[in-house]
Amino acid sequence: MYQKSILDNGLRVLTSTMPQTRSVSISFFIGTGSRYEADSEAGISHFIEHLCFRGTEKRPTARDISTAIEGVGGILNGGTDKELTVYWCKVARPYLETTFDVLVDMLINSRFDPEDMEKERQVIIEEINMSNDSPSQRVGMLIDELLWPGHPLGRDIAGSRDSVSNISRELMLEYLANHYRPGNIVMAAAGNIQHEEIVSMVNQALGKWAGRQSRAGYLTCKENPFPRLRIENRELEQVHLCLALPGLSLLDPRRFAADLLNVILGDGMSSRLFTNIRDKLGLAYSISSYVDHFLDTGSLIIGAGVDIKNLHTAIKAIIEELAQLKETIPESELNKAKEFSKGRLLLRMEDSRSVAGWIGGQELLTERVLTVDEVVSIVDGITVEELQQLARELLTGEKLRLAIVGPVSPDAPLDELFKL
């Protein structure tokens, strides 16, 4: 259950009362992320998020901000994704007012001090370097480039060393003014709270914030089947691979069926990939799959690390698992996947931060908040026939993409294995 109010300036406030908890979680969701950036702005959403933790007039240093929350045992953090940015905090109930003041101060009073900006620019470049040095992260970047070539969704959220080096303070403040507007923001709170008290707090602090601008437009995606293979040669002990297929958008009602397909395929130690590729064949220590749903597109991605001598065998075995999904899904396996999904969801809802994320994220991205009971009902209604029909539609050989990082020749004809 949740309640929703909209301030006169368009800022949306959603709350969920959890009287059994001693905590309160507050999240501010901003309707911007890396897909809203032009090429010259690549990484700017992430850069802004970092700088909002650097200091305000009231709390001039990053330490002042963190101490205000950590000093009372709370947790403060933020994150930038492709389609949203979030700032969140979780504290014990007595510190609600202080926590709210800190988050609001960060959002509207951050200094963007030039000296701090240069320091944080170097921090982000080191973050980019670290990601590039990690084969498992790097292969994830490459598969995104194959899924969405030449599109902002295919870029690293943090941008590149070049783009981050060239972002000016003026460009940042202009981007901030265009995207950090009340009509493009959802504030979600969950825990031992009442809706009216939260709305009153938000209205007092942000009710006079000017502007009703809603979510900005974005470059839509068009499916492009080429290129299908990307190999980055590195001298490593393992070959890191991602095998991917285009998936369903966040607005597609069949996304819940796609989620169940993923559970069966590669989510958890009882999934088909883990059971067959790791346990039976011994080809990988780590193997799993996941799905992404964006506003107009999506993906199904399988990731693994294997020995170079087992690369061809592993790819063939993974593709065989995909092919098997189109052939047979026993009712018992579907029921297990349903219980897995429902159980994970219900466990998440015991945490106030997860509840705030559940209601706030849905409101920002889809403007419709499905309750837990509604999602459970949708999942329970999915049939084997629906899953197999979706599998036959999505799991086709001509849509496969493969990214490799490891000791593999860039000219290796691995796309010859794409028979599904």
Image (tube, rainbow, N blue to C red):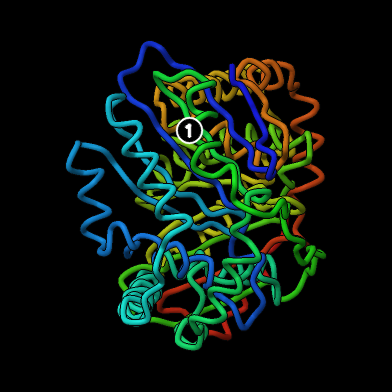
Residue 126 percent across, percent down from the top left: 32, 77
Residue of label 1? 201
Give the percent coordinates (x, y) of residue 304: 45, 56
Residue drawn at point x = 55 percent, y = 46 percent = 29
**Quarter of the picture holding the C terminus:** bottom right
Residue at 50% in and 58% down: 80
Q: Quadrant of residue 350?
A: top left
Residue 97: quadrant of the picture: top left
Secondary structure of the residue carrying numbered label 1: helix
Identify the image quadrant of the N terminus. top right
Q: Is 255 situated above or below 233? A: above
The percent position of residue 136, horizontal first and vertical second, equals 41, 64
Residue furthest to the left in view is 71
Q: Which of 349 and 242 is in front in this view?
A: 349
The reply to whether residue 342 is visible in this rendering is yes
At x 61% / y 66%, what residue is drawn?
177
Q: Residues within 10 Å of mark 1 (few under 14, many from 20)?
A: some
* Residue 207 image point, x, y percent: 59, 42
Give, as a three-letter code, the residue at label 1. Met
Lateral position of residue 409 relative to residue 217, left or right: left
Horizontal placement of 166 versus 88: left or right?
A: right
Residue at (66, 47) in percent of width and height: 293
Residue nearer the viewer, 395 or 223: 223
The reply, left or right, for residue 119 in relation to residue 30 is left
In the picture shown, does residue 287 fall above or below 400?
Answer: above
Residue 133 showing in the rendered view: no
